[in-house]
Image (spheres, rainbow, N blue to C red):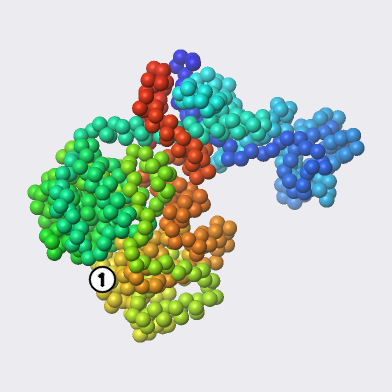
């Protein structure tokens, strides 16, 4: 390596990349030489020269031959042109080549010279619709890389910058994987892999490079996670030494039996609470699986042991629902939860703040308001975060900082976007995972029906049947009121008027974000008490609304929602032993939209749905990468390469148990990489 040079150097170190170009590269996430080298092509154009007999109509291919006619440019229209010439691709085959709106190429086309051309084959005309002249320097390549770019930054400029980076920094590319792993799995050096990711000569080179990059990404991700876990296990935590018999009495007071999965989760969490290191656990489960009750029992265990506990949730509706549920179940045995949200008056807030500071209040449930500086606990022992992907890493840390010792607080995070346990173990590497994979007894599958707008009468008939049986209905839409860009989508206010006319004997109300908090509370209480039979709402009802008597949910313009969101919405019904129905009114125009509707109608299992959603939208969008600190892999795919992720996890686990397998240089390289990543994250 060259003294003073590093692949973390700025792009401005490359020739021809000034302030403007640096800014353009930064727009696509490239600030350093390393970023540039890891900016892989999203596809390759196959530029292998082909025989005419093997080519299909409209196929993109490369043909090579001798130029047998002078290039001719014809201009037509405004700034439009057509460049034509003829190419002898064999002794007896001559084709025509056409380039549109690239008249300057005429200066590069010379009679009698050999030229390779990449383009789209039009078999009827025996014509190649030219897309690119292949330069002599590229003639030994089979694949041409195509990159994501931005305005002002052209493909040739990206390729030139990458080539220059390899020329000047190839020796500065460190080998990040331990030597013995490269030998064990026969992987090529990183510098070679990076070059072959950009400029493979053939399919085998591309395969070698991808194999190395995928394993390395998973290995480094697991290294950082498991290292953090190892360090966390060495910290001294707040031990929640609760009375087991007293907790059992609380569980026996619940008017129904916990499911086997709930019991297992409670045991796992309580075991961690009693450990001498701080708990870091993820509780995942499908909609309606009973995660909240498990969280309540963990809170009660903390209170029994003499500690305070806090439950942080993303919305006021959800906070109020949780407080109501907790007190309904446990206030009779002397356990009461208090609410803390931003809309409370000054006197109410002061009472809660004082109560938490003195220790009088032991259980609090609230929104982001809980992490403000004014909130101080006397002895916080357990913090729980519901819908954890809606909170940023900093917000979660702010909650943990409420403890006397911020590193000692036990943390339980909850998510209703479940993924397979094996995958969860690899992704939430620094956390233990508890999974609730069964629904409470007596729950019936929700009948899900795809409906086109023309079939709305069948939905109205079903609504009428359920209303006459004394049940209630949700009607969900993506908009509150009309928008000039989305006029075709009926909005909450229009639909509520239509439903009032259609069902005059029933109370129809609306719920959306433009109502003030007091109005929202009145609407929710009215629906909860069955004073309102039809609730027309936005996605505000996605979480925190639990009305057992609601048996129908109609989701209009369903194609506009993601799979996870549709599944959450569907979970508003089916919360009792009553038969329930979900009607998805949609007219998807894209293949992705059609796929989402089919998945929703065919599957009830949240584990399957979340996996399919991740395949369609990506892991980060579903699980909340920015919020949860999940990785953004350059190339690896957690579903297609799941087996590699598991191998990497196992290898890291073994290596941390036997660190003597690493040389001092390898330890230093990995340490520097982790330190750099922590700064960037």
Q: Residue at x 39, y 72 (%)?
A: 579
The answer to whether one can see residue 320 in this image is no
Q: Pinpoint residue 413: horizontal percent, then vertical percent.
A: 30, 48
Number of labelled discs? 1
The residue at which mark 1 appears reads as 525
Q: Residue at x 42, y 48 (%)?
A: 420
The answer to whether one can see residue 567 in this image is yes
Q: Residue furthest top?
A: 3
Residue 681 lies, with reference to residue 484, above or below; the image says: above
How would you rate the neighbour count of disc 1 (Cα within 10 Å): few for under 14, some for 14-19, many for 20 or more?
few
Q: Nearer the viewer, residue 29 or 605?
A: 605
Q: Quadrant of the C terminus?
A: top left
Q: Secondary structure at mark 1?
A: helix
- 452 with respect to 228 (left or right): right
Q: Pinpoint residue 362: horizontal percent, then vertical percent.
A: 14, 52
Q: Nearer the viewer, residue 113 or 382?
A: 382
Q: Residue at x 90, y 34 (%)?
A: 91
Q: Residue at x 16, y 57 (%)?
A: 249
- 347 with respect to 112 (left or right): left
Q: Pinpoint residue 353: horizontal percent, then vertical percent.
A: 14, 52
């Amino acid at each position: 390596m060259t003294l003073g040079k590093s692949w973390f150097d700025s792009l401005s170190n490359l020739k021809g990349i000034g302030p403007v170009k640096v800014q353009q590269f930064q727009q696509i996430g490239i600030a350093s030489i390393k970023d540039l080298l890891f900016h892989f092509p999203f596809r390759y154009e196959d530029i292998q020269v082909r025989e005419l007999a093997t080519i299909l109509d409209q196929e993109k291919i490369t043909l090579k031959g001798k130029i047998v006619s002078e290039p001719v440019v014809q201009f037509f229209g405004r700034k439009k042109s057509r460049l034509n010439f003829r190419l002898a691709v064999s002794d007896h085959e001559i084709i025509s080549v056409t380039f549109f709106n690239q008249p300057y190429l005429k200066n590069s086309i010379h009679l009698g010279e050999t030229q390779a051309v990449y383009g789209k084959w039009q078999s009827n005309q025996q014509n190649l619709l030219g897309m690119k002249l292949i330069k002599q320097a590229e003639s030994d390549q089979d694949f041409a890389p195509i990159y994501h770019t931005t305005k002002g930054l052209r493909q040739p400029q990206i390729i030139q910058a990458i080539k220059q980076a390899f020329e000047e920094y190839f020796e500065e590319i460190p080998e990040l994987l331990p030597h013995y792993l490269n030998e064990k799995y026969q992987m090529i050096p990183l510098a070679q892999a990076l070059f072959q990711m950009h400029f493979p000569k053939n399919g085998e080179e591309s395969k070698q490079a991808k194999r190395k990059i995928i394993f390395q990404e998973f290995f480094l991700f697991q290294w950082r996670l498991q290292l953090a876990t190892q360090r966390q296990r060495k910290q001294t935590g707040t031990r929640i030494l609760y009375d087991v018999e007293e907790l059992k009495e609380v569980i026996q007071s619940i008017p129904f039996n916990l499911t086997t999965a709930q019991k297992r989760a409670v045991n796992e969490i309580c075991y961690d609470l009693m450990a001498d290191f701080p708990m870091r656990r993820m509780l995942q489960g499908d909609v309606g699986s009973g995660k909240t009750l498990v969280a309540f029992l963990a809170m009660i265990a903390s209170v029994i042991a003499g500690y305070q506990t806090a439950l942080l949730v993303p919305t006021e509706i959800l906070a109020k629902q949780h407080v109501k549920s907790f007190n309904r179940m446990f206030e009779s045995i002397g356990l009461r939860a208090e609410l803390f949200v931003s809309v409370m008056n000054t006197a109410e807030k002061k009472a809660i703040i004082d109560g938490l500071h003195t220790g009088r209040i032991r259980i609090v449930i609230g929104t982001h308001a809980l992490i403000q500086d004014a909130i101080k606990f006397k002895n916080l022992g357990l913090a729980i975060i519901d819908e954890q992907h809606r909170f940023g890493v900093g917000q979660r840390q702010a909650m943990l900082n409420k403890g006397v010792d911020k590193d000692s607080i036990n943390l339980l995070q909850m998510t209703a976007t479940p993924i397979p346990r094996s995958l969860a173990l690899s992704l939430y590497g620094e956390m233990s995972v508890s999974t609730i994979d069964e629904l409470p007894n007596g729950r019936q599958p929700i009948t899900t029906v795809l409906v086109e707008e023309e079939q709305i009468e069948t939905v109205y008939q079903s609504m009428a049947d359920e209303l006459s049986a004394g049940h209630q209905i949700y009607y969900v839409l993506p908009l509150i009121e009309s928008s000039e860009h989305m006029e075709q989508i009926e909005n909450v206010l229009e639909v509520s008027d239509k439903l009032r006319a259609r069902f005059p004997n029933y109370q129809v109300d609306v719920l959306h974000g433009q109502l003030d908090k007091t109005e929202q509370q009145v609407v929710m209480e009215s629906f909860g008490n069955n004073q309102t039979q039809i609730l027309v709402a936005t996605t505000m009802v996605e979480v925190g609304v639990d009305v057992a008597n609601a048996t129908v949910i109609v989701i209009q313009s369903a194609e506009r929602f993601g799979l996870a969101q549709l599944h959450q919405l569907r979970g508003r019904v089916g919360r009792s032993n009553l038969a329930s129905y979900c009607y998805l009114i949609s007219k998807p125009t894209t293949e992705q939209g059609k796929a989402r509707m089919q998945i929703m109608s065919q599957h009830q299992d949240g584990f399957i749905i979340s996996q399919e959603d991740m395949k369609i939208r990506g892991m980060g969008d579903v699980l909340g990468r920015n919020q949860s600190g999940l990785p953004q892999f350059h190339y690896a795919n957690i579903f297609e390469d799941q087996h590699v992720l598991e191998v990497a996890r196992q290898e890291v686990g073994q290596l941390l148990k036997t660190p003597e397998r690493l040389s001092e240089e390898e330890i230093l390289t990995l340490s520097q990489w982790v330190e750099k990543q922590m700064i960037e994250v």
